[in-house]
């Protein structure tokens, strides 16, 4: 679960649990209060019963008279009540049989005659002290049934609390899934939108809330981005086409001037440099045109099911000749991969671009190695050089346009900085992946290409 969904679930569970806990605490207090009031009413009812038996001659009561009048009734009630009748600061004139020789505790209270008391022999009781003439009558009821009821309440509450926590977690998860569904739609749409897929939009219903307003605002922003990208692509394409014509004219004039045998050597060398720069500009324009078409998915690939080993075998002599021309060694390690759908012409161009980069990065007499293996349902093709390599941060930007890193100790390569960007576009059109990483301690750079085998999803 994502953090925000987990937080929503946790907040909901905590709110539900805290609410139930407050209700349980309030219920505990109310239930205990009602049960104590019930015991107080029982005690008062028993006192009224005793008072009725002893009326009307309170002043003439003696222990014998009390025994005669209420002993039988008190003994019947002794299973529920403890009864003690006495005058203040004098011994009791009557005790119920269940008290035996014990004296009931008594407390003089002005607010309420009822109080809780505890005796080591009879336990905790709910007692009430009443005034009957010159006598004080204490009637007490055992508190154990109340404590048992409250303990049962706590146990039931604990079970319900656990159940509510589990149910609230499940409910909170479901609610978070429902509430975050529009956010997931925004995330999924935003992840699909790229320079090659600017037409995707976030689905927005007729709901008018903050998330719907955010989705509409993002859709408007995507509209503006799509318009801007379209304008940039059109400008790149138009500018490239428009530049080719004047460059061709300039080249024709320069070549015509070179045919003049009267031109001195200094001017001839200048014209040769001019033609080289024009050729370089033409290559840059062609590369920009290709990248513009690739971004618009206007490049048609001739995908064919073929064995990569055969294409690499055809590339091997040319690569060795090119490496030897620059005083380097080219080696290839490959295994039969099986049939893979790719355009051999463009994959060969990618390999050639990578080989030229490796040659420019490697020292004299360096070794450039290409490996082709089958790896986790992928065709894995890598090329390593003996150069100084790049850092992890540089590797992350190496496929961006016009990015070039100079090789220490060597003259700056006058490339356009678009070769690796073209490699990235070609591999992306094949629904593959290209990336760079340091080859290891003391080694150069390793550039890897992964193309999916038939029947596998894009990696």
Image (spheres, rainbow, N blue to C red):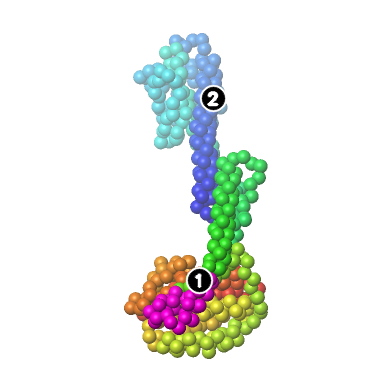
Label 2 crowd bin: few (<14), some (14–19), many (20+), radius 10 Å: some
Q: Is residue 77 visible?
A: yes
Q: Position of residue 273 (x, y in %)?
A: 43, 76
Q: Could you tell me how far apart the alpha carbons at marks 1 and 2 are, in whole angstroms? A: 118 Å
What numbered label is drawn on residue 42?
2
In magenta stretch: residue 71: no
What segment carries the magenta color? Answer: 248-275
Q: Nearer the viewer, residue 107 or 420?
A: 420
Q: Answer with the quarter of the image where residue 415 lies.
A: bottom left
Q: Residue at x 58, y 43 (%)?
A: 213
In magenta stretch: residue 253: yes
Q: Is residue 350 above or below residue 156?
A: below
Residue linked to disc 1: 250
Q: Quadrant of the N terminus?
A: bottom right
Q: Answer with the quarter of the image where residue 374 lies.
A: bottom right
Q: Quadrant of the C terminus?
A: bottom right
Q: Is residue 435 visible?
A: no
Q: How many marks?
A: 2
Q: Residue at x 42, y 30 (%)?
A: 117
Q: Position of residue 450 (x, y in %)?
A: 55, 74
């Amino acid at each position: 679960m994502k953090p925000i969904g987990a937080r929503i679930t946790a907040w909901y569970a905590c709110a539900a649990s805290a609410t139930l806990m407050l209700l349980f605490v309030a219920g505990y207090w109310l239930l205990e209060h009602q049960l104590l009031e019930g015991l107080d009413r029982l005690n008062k009812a028993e006192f009224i019963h005793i008072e009725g038996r002893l009326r009307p001659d309170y002043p003439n009561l003696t222990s014998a008279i009390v025994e005669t009048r209420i002993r039988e009734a008190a003994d019947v009630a002794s299973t529920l009540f403890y009864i003690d009748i006495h005058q203040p600061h004098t011994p009791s004139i009557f005790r119920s049989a269940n008290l035996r020789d014990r004296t009931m505790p008594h407390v003089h209270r002005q607010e309420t005659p009822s109080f809780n008391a505890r005796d080591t022999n009879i336990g905790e009781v709910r007692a009430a002290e009443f005034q009957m003439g010159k006598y004080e009558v204490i009637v007490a009821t055992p508190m154990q049934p109340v404590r048992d009821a409250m303990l049962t309440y706590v146990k039931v509450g604990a079970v319900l609390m656990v159940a509510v926590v589990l149910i609230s977690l499940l409910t909170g998860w479901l609610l978070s899934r429902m509430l975050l569904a529009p956010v997931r739609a925004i995330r999924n749409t935003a992840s699909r939108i790229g320079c090659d897929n600017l037409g995707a939009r976030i689905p927005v219903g007729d709901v008018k809330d903050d998330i719907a307003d955010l989705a509409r605002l993002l859709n408007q922003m995507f509209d503006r981005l799509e318009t801007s990208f379209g304008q940039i692509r059109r400008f790149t394409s138009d500018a490239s086409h428009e530049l080719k014509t004047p460059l061709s004219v300039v080249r024709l004039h320069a070549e015509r001037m070179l045919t003049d045998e009267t031109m001195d050597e200094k001017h001839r060398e200048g014209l040769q440099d001019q033609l080289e720069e024009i050729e370089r500009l033409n290559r840059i324009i062609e590369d920009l045109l290709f990248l513009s078409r690739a971004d618009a998915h206007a490049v048609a690939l001739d995908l064919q099911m073929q064995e990569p080993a055969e294409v690499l075998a055809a590339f091997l002599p040319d690569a060795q000749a090119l490496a030897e021309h620059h005083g380097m060694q080219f080696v290839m390690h490959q295994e039969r991969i099986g049939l893979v759908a790719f355009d051999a012409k463009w994959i060969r161009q990618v390999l050639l671009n990578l080989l030229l980069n490796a040659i420019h990065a490697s020292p004299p007499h360096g070794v450039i190695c290409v490996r082709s293996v089958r790896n986790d349902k992928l065709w894995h093709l890598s090329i390593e050089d003996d150069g100084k390599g790049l850092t992890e941060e540089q590797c992350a930007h190496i496929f961006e346009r016009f990015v070039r890193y100079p090789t220490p100790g060597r003259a700056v390569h006058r490339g356009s900085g678009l070769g690796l960007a073209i490699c990235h576009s070609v591999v992306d059109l094949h629904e593959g992946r290209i990336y760079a990483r340091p080859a290891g301690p003391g080694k150069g750079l390793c550039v890897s290409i992964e193309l999916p085998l038939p029947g596998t999803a894009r990696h």
